[in-house]
Image (spheres, rainbow, N blue to C red):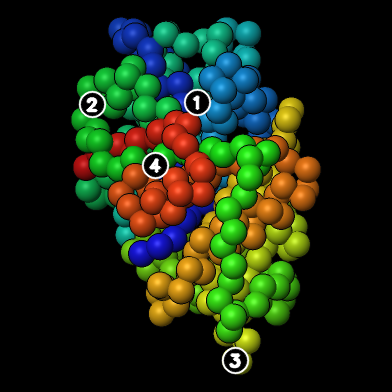
Amino acid sequence: MLGHSGSPAATGYCGGMTGAFTPDPIPVDRTDRLTAAETAEIVALAQAAGAADGADPLSEAVLLRLRHGGAGAHLLIRDRDDTLAGYAHVDLEDAVDGPWAEVVVHPAHRRKGLGRRLVEEALAVAREADPRGRLRMWAHGDHPSAGALAVDLGFARSRVLLQLRRPLTQPMPERPLPEHVHLRTFEPGRDDAAWLDLNARAFASHPEQGRWTERDLRLRMEEPWFDPAGFLLAVERATGRLLGFHWTKVHDGTPPIGEVYVLGVDPDAHGQGLGAALAVAGLRYLRERGLDRVMLYVEESNVAALTLYRRLGFAHWAAHVLYRHG
Protein backbone atom coordinates (compact mmCIF):
# COMPACT_ATOMS: atom_id res chain seq x y z
CA MET A 1 0.00 0.00 0.00
CA LEU A 2 1.32 3.43 -0.94
CA GLY A 3 0.20 5.67 1.85
CA HIS A 4 1.28 7.74 4.75
CA SER A 5 -0.42 8.28 8.06
CA GLY A 6 0.32 11.48 9.87
CA SER A 7 1.84 12.05 13.18
CA PRO A 8 1.31 9.24 15.69
CA ALA A 9 -2.20 10.40 16.28
CA ALA A 10 -3.80 7.33 17.64
CA THR A 11 -1.31 5.51 19.81
CA GLY A 12 0.89 8.27 21.09
CA TYR A 13 4.33 8.61 22.60
CA CYS A 14 5.89 7.48 25.84
CA GLY A 15 8.36 10.14 26.91
CA GLY A 16 10.45 10.31 30.07
CA MET A 17 10.16 6.61 30.91
CA THR A 18 13.59 6.57 32.53
CA GLY A 19 14.22 6.41 36.25
CA ALA A 20 15.79 4.27 38.94
CA PHE A 21 13.54 2.10 41.07
CA THR A 22 12.70 3.40 44.53
CA PRO A 23 11.44 1.02 47.24
CA ASP A 24 8.89 3.45 48.65
CA PRO A 25 5.65 3.64 46.67
CA ILE A 26 5.23 6.95 44.87
CA PRO A 27 1.67 8.23 45.25
CA VAL A 28 -0.25 8.57 41.99
CA ASP A 29 -3.50 10.52 41.69
CA ARG A 30 -5.99 9.05 39.24
CA THR A 31 -8.94 10.88 37.73
CA ASP A 32 -11.30 10.39 34.81
CA ARG A 33 -11.95 14.11 34.49
CA LEU A 34 -9.45 16.96 34.62
CA THR A 35 -10.05 20.50 35.75
CA ALA A 36 -9.01 23.38 33.51
CA ALA A 37 -6.14 24.10 35.89
CA GLU A 38 -4.90 20.50 35.74
CA THR A 39 -5.06 20.50 31.95
CA ALA A 40 -2.98 23.69 31.87
CA GLU A 41 -0.43 22.08 34.21
CA ILE A 42 -0.12 19.03 31.95
CA VAL A 43 0.35 21.15 28.85
CA ALA A 44 3.03 23.21 30.62
CA LEU A 45 4.80 20.04 31.80
CA ALA A 46 4.75 18.63 28.26
CA GLN A 47 6.16 21.88 26.88
CA ALA A 48 9.02 21.79 29.40
CA ALA A 49 9.80 18.18 28.48
CA GLY A 50 9.57 18.95 24.78
CA ALA A 51 11.98 21.88 25.12
CA ALA A 52 14.47 19.68 26.96
CA ASP A 53 14.15 16.67 24.64
CA GLY A 54 13.72 18.42 21.30
CA ALA A 55 10.38 16.73 20.61
CA ASP A 56 6.85 16.91 21.97
CA PRO A 57 6.19 14.06 24.44
CA LEU A 58 2.38 14.04 24.06
CA SER A 59 0.79 13.17 20.76
CA GLU A 60 -2.01 14.96 19.01
CA ALA A 61 -4.40 12.23 20.12
CA VAL A 62 -3.73 12.90 23.82
CA LEU A 63 -3.88 16.67 23.40
CA LEU A 64 -7.29 16.26 21.75
CA ARG A 65 -8.46 14.12 24.66
CA LEU A 66 -7.19 16.67 27.15
CA ARG A 67 -9.37 19.30 25.48
CA HIS A 68 -12.39 17.21 24.48
CA GLY A 69 -12.46 14.19 26.79
CA GLY A 70 -12.63 10.48 26.06
CA ALA A 71 -12.77 7.11 27.80
CA GLY A 72 -9.62 6.80 29.86
CA ALA A 73 -7.68 7.66 32.98
CA HIS A 74 -5.35 10.54 33.83
CA LEU A 75 -2.50 9.71 36.22
CA LEU A 76 -0.66 12.52 38.00
CA ILE A 77 2.37 12.59 40.29
CA ARG A 78 3.13 15.72 42.31
CA ASP A 79 6.19 16.76 44.27
CA ARG A 80 6.23 17.98 47.87
CA ASP A 81 5.31 21.49 46.73
CA ASP A 82 2.25 20.11 44.87
CA THR A 83 3.88 20.87 41.53
CA LEU A 84 3.04 18.42 38.74
CA ALA A 85 6.11 16.23 38.18
CA GLY A 86 4.75 13.45 35.98
CA TYR A 87 1.68 12.57 33.93
CA ALA A 88 0.27 9.58 32.10
CA HIS A 89 -2.82 9.20 29.98
CA VAL A 90 -4.37 5.76 29.51
CA ASP A 91 -6.83 5.56 26.64
CA LEU A 92 -9.50 2.86 26.85
CA GLU A 93 -11.48 3.46 23.66
CA ASP A 94 -9.80 0.88 21.38
CA ALA A 95 -11.71 -2.36 21.86
CA VAL A 96 -9.72 -4.10 19.09
CA ASP A 97 -6.10 -3.59 20.14
CA GLY A 98 -6.71 -2.69 23.76
CA PRO A 99 -5.59 0.27 25.89
CA TRP A 100 -2.69 2.54 25.04
CA ALA A 101 -0.86 5.08 27.12
CA GLU A 102 1.57 7.99 27.04
CA VAL A 103 3.88 9.04 29.84
CA VAL A 104 5.86 12.22 30.43
CA VAL A 105 8.04 13.26 33.36
CA HIS A 106 9.28 16.80 33.95
CA PRO A 107 13.03 17.09 33.20
CA ALA A 108 13.70 18.33 36.74
CA HIS A 109 12.14 15.19 38.24
CA ARG A 110 13.68 12.42 36.17
CA ARG A 111 15.80 9.56 37.48
CA LYS A 112 13.62 9.34 40.58
CA GLY A 113 11.45 6.39 39.54
CA LEU A 114 8.48 8.49 38.45
CA GLY A 115 8.41 7.12 34.93
CA ARG A 116 8.46 3.53 36.16
CA ARG A 117 5.73 4.29 38.69
CA LEU A 118 3.48 5.84 36.05
CA VAL A 119 3.96 2.90 33.69
CA GLU A 120 3.18 0.45 36.52
CA GLU A 121 -0.01 2.36 37.33
CA ALA A 122 -0.92 2.49 33.63
CA LEU A 123 -0.58 -1.30 33.52
CA ALA A 124 -2.92 -1.57 36.50
CA VAL A 125 -5.50 0.63 34.75
CA ALA A 126 -5.18 -1.48 31.60
CA ARG A 127 -5.75 -4.69 33.54
CA GLU A 128 -8.98 -3.28 34.95
CA ALA A 129 -10.30 -2.53 31.47
CA ASP A 130 -8.89 -5.40 29.42
CA PRO A 131 -9.08 -9.06 30.51
CA ARG A 132 -5.75 -9.73 28.80
CA GLY A 133 -4.04 -6.80 30.48
CA ARG A 134 -2.84 -5.41 27.15
CA LEU A 135 -1.15 -2.04 26.93
CA ARG A 136 0.69 -0.25 24.12
CA MET A 137 3.26 2.48 24.67
CA TRP A 138 5.58 4.40 22.37
CA ALA A 139 9.22 4.98 23.37
CA HIS A 140 9.89 8.41 21.96
CA GLY A 141 13.20 8.65 20.14
CA ASP A 142 14.00 4.97 20.76
CA HIS A 143 16.03 5.97 23.83
CA PRO A 144 18.00 3.01 25.28
CA SER A 145 16.87 3.80 28.85
CA ALA A 146 13.22 3.79 27.83
CA GLY A 147 13.74 0.53 25.98
CA ALA A 148 15.43 -1.05 28.99
CA LEU A 149 12.58 -0.01 31.29
CA ALA A 150 9.97 -1.29 28.83
CA VAL A 151 11.65 -4.70 28.62
CA ASP A 152 12.10 -4.80 32.41
CA LEU A 153 8.35 -4.30 32.85
CA GLY A 154 7.43 -7.03 30.36
CA PHE A 155 6.88 -5.01 27.18
CA ALA A 156 8.00 -6.35 23.80
CA ARG A 157 9.21 -4.22 20.91
CA SER A 158 6.70 -4.52 18.07
CA ARG A 159 6.63 -1.55 15.69
CA VAL A 160 8.79 1.36 14.53
CA LEU A 161 7.61 4.74 13.30
CA LEU A 162 10.16 6.95 11.55
CA GLN A 163 10.21 10.71 11.38
CA LEU A 164 11.72 12.05 8.16
CA ARG A 165 12.52 15.66 7.30
CA ARG A 166 13.35 17.68 4.24
CA PRO A 167 14.35 21.31 3.64
CA LEU A 168 11.86 23.15 1.43
CA THR A 169 14.61 25.44 0.21
CA GLN A 170 16.03 22.72 -2.03
CA PRO A 171 14.74 22.28 -5.62
CA MET A 172 11.45 20.43 -5.90
CA PRO A 173 11.13 17.56 -8.42
CA GLU A 174 8.54 17.72 -11.20
CA ARG A 175 5.75 15.22 -10.57
CA PRO A 176 2.72 16.19 -12.70
CA LEU A 177 -0.76 14.82 -12.14
CA PRO A 178 -2.20 12.41 -14.72
CA GLU A 179 -4.25 14.22 -17.38
CA HIS A 180 -7.53 12.68 -16.19
CA VAL A 181 -7.04 14.06 -12.66
CA HIS A 182 -7.30 17.59 -11.31
CA LEU A 183 -6.44 19.07 -7.94
CA ARG A 184 -8.78 21.00 -5.65
CA THR A 185 -9.00 21.80 -1.96
CA PHE A 186 -11.10 20.04 0.63
CA GLU A 187 -14.52 21.59 1.29
CA PRO A 188 -15.78 20.98 4.86
CA GLY A 189 -19.36 19.71 4.85
CA ARG A 190 -19.16 18.62 1.22
CA ASP A 191 -16.20 16.23 1.22
CA ASP A 192 -16.35 14.77 4.74
CA ALA A 193 -18.07 11.46 3.97
CA ALA A 194 -16.25 10.84 0.69
CA TRP A 195 -12.90 11.56 2.30
CA LEU A 196 -13.58 9.26 5.26
CA ASP A 197 -14.46 6.48 2.82
CA LEU A 198 -11.29 7.08 0.79
CA ASN A 199 -9.16 7.27 3.95
CA ALA A 200 -10.55 3.92 5.12
CA ARG A 201 -9.75 2.36 1.74
CA ALA A 202 -6.26 3.84 1.51
CA PHE A 203 -5.38 2.77 5.06
CA ALA A 204 -7.39 -0.43 5.34
CA SER A 205 -4.44 -2.26 6.91
CA HIS A 206 -3.23 0.59 9.09
CA PRO A 207 -3.85 0.02 12.83
CA GLU A 208 -5.10 3.57 13.51
CA GLN A 209 -5.55 5.78 10.46
CA GLY A 210 -8.00 3.53 8.65
CA ARG A 211 -10.40 3.58 11.61
CA TRP A 212 -11.00 7.32 11.63
CA THR A 213 -14.61 8.30 12.28
CA GLU A 214 -16.61 11.43 11.58
CA ARG A 215 -15.75 12.62 15.10
CA ASP A 216 -12.02 12.14 14.49
CA LEU A 217 -12.24 14.29 11.38
CA ARG A 218 -14.45 16.93 13.00
CA LEU A 219 -12.17 17.37 16.01
CA ARG A 220 -9.21 18.07 13.75
CA MET A 221 -11.19 20.45 11.58
CA GLU A 222 -11.95 22.40 14.76
CA GLU A 223 -8.25 22.72 15.62
CA PRO A 224 -6.61 26.17 15.17
CA TRP A 225 -4.10 24.74 12.71
CA PHE A 226 -6.71 23.36 10.31
CA ASP A 227 -6.63 25.06 6.90
CA PRO A 228 -8.68 23.57 4.03
CA ALA A 229 -6.37 25.37 1.59
CA GLY A 230 -3.66 22.92 2.62
CA PHE A 231 -5.94 19.86 2.32
CA LEU A 232 -5.46 18.84 -1.32
CA LEU A 233 -7.71 16.37 -3.14
CA ALA A 234 -6.97 14.52 -6.38
CA VAL A 235 -10.28 14.23 -8.26
CA GLU A 236 -11.14 12.22 -11.37
CA ARG A 237 -12.28 14.76 -13.97
CA ALA A 238 -14.94 12.60 -15.62
CA THR A 239 -16.69 11.41 -12.46
CA GLY A 240 -15.66 13.74 -9.62
CA ARG A 241 -14.51 10.71 -7.62
CA LEU A 242 -11.81 11.26 -5.03
CA LEU A 243 -8.68 9.31 -5.94
CA GLY A 244 -6.16 10.61 -3.42
CA PHE A 245 -5.33 13.38 -0.99
CA HIS A 246 -2.50 15.22 0.72
CA TRP A 247 -3.49 16.86 4.00
CA THR A 248 -0.77 19.22 5.18
CA LYS A 249 -0.29 20.76 8.61
CA VAL A 250 1.73 23.68 9.95
CA HIS A 251 3.21 23.47 13.45
CA ASP A 252 3.72 26.75 15.24
CA GLY A 253 7.21 27.22 16.58
CA THR A 254 10.40 29.16 16.21
CA PRO A 255 10.72 28.56 13.36
CA PRO A 256 7.46 26.86 12.30
CA ILE A 257 7.61 23.58 10.42
CA GLY A 258 5.27 22.00 7.89
CA GLU A 259 4.07 18.41 7.97
CA VAL A 260 2.89 15.85 5.48
CA TYR A 261 0.03 15.10 7.84
CA VAL A 262 -1.77 12.40 5.86
CA LEU A 263 -1.11 11.31 2.27
CA GLY A 264 -3.19 8.55 0.72
CA VAL A 265 -4.22 7.09 -2.63
CA ASP A 266 -7.19 4.87 -3.47
CA PRO A 267 -5.87 1.31 -3.99
CA ASP A 268 -7.67 1.22 -7.37
CA ALA A 269 -5.65 4.27 -8.49
CA HIS A 270 -2.19 2.95 -7.64
CA GLY A 271 0.44 2.91 -10.37
CA GLN A 272 -0.54 6.29 -11.86
CA GLY A 273 2.00 8.44 -10.05
CA LEU A 274 -0.65 10.05 -7.85
CA GLY A 275 1.29 9.58 -4.62
CA ALA A 276 4.35 11.44 -5.88
CA ALA A 277 2.28 14.16 -7.59
CA LEU A 278 0.22 14.78 -4.45
CA ALA A 279 3.33 14.80 -2.27
CA VAL A 280 5.04 17.43 -4.40
CA ALA A 281 1.86 19.54 -4.63
CA GLY A 282 1.65 19.63 -0.84
CA LEU A 283 5.33 20.46 -0.46
CA ARG A 284 4.95 23.35 -2.91
CA TYR A 285 1.97 24.61 -0.93
CA LEU A 286 3.96 24.56 2.31
CA ARG A 287 6.85 26.38 0.65
CA GLU A 288 4.44 29.02 -0.65
CA ARG A 289 3.35 29.49 2.97
CA GLY A 290 6.90 30.68 3.65
CA LEU A 291 8.10 27.54 5.44
CA ASP A 292 11.62 26.28 4.95
CA ARG A 293 11.35 22.73 6.31
CA VAL A 294 8.87 19.87 6.44
CA MET A 295 8.49 16.64 8.40
CA LEU A 296 6.44 13.46 8.21
CA TYR A 297 5.90 10.18 10.02
CA VAL A 298 5.96 6.85 8.21
CA GLU A 299 5.98 3.23 9.24
CA GLU A 300 9.40 1.59 8.93
CA SER A 301 7.63 -1.39 7.34
CA ASN A 302 5.98 0.75 4.61
CA VAL A 303 8.66 0.20 1.97
CA ALA A 304 6.68 1.84 -0.86
CA ALA A 305 6.13 5.06 1.07
CA LEU A 306 9.72 5.16 2.34
CA THR A 307 11.02 4.75 -1.21
CA LEU A 308 8.80 7.58 -2.44
CA TYR A 309 9.81 9.98 0.31
CA ARG A 310 13.52 9.29 -0.03
CA ARG A 311 13.29 9.94 -3.76
CA LEU A 312 11.66 13.26 -2.90
CA GLY A 313 14.61 14.25 -0.72
CA PHE A 314 13.47 13.23 2.76
CA ALA A 315 16.03 11.88 5.22
CA HIS A 316 15.88 10.12 8.59
CA TRP A 317 15.43 12.38 11.61
CA ALA A 318 14.22 10.16 14.49
CA ALA A 319 12.63 6.82 15.32
CA HIS A 320 9.83 5.89 17.71
CA VAL A 321 9.28 2.35 18.92
CA LEU A 322 5.98 0.83 19.97
CA TYR A 323 6.13 -1.58 22.89
CA ARG A 324 3.30 -3.99 23.67
CA HIS A 325 2.40 -5.68 26.91
CA GLY A 326 0.09 -8.67 27.07
Amino acid type at image mark 4: Leu
Q: CA distance from mark 2 to mark 3?
A: 52 Å
Badge 2 is on which residue? 151
Front position in the image: 240 or 74: 240
Kindly identify the residue that appears in the image at 42 percent across and 8 percent down: 112
Q: Residue at x 64, y 60 (%)?
A: 281
Horizontal side of 228 relative to 264 (left or right) equals right
Q: Quadrant of the N terminus?
A: bottom left
What residue sits 50% from the left and 25% below the top?
Answer: 104
Which quadrant would the C terminus be assigned to in this image? top left
Earlier along the polypeptide chain: callout 1 or callout 4? Answer: 1
Is 152 positioned to the left or the right of 273 in the image? left
| 207 or 301, nearer to the observer | 301
What is the three-letter code of the residue carrying label 1? Val
Residue 258 coordinates in the image, percent (x, y)? 66, 44
For mark 2, give the secondary structure: helix
What is the spatial separation of the Cα atoms under label 4 and label 2, in whole angstroms? 18 Å
Report which residue position mark 1 lands on: 104
Q: Amino acid at mark 2?
A: Val
Q: Which element is circle 1 on?
A: strand
Image mark for residue 239: 3
Quarter-wise, where is residue 19 in the image? top left
- Residue 280 in view here: yes
SS under mark 4: strand
Residue corresponding to mark 4: 161
Is mark 1 in CB contact (under 8 Å) with mark 4? Answer: no
* Looking at the image, residue 130 lies above or below residue 140: below
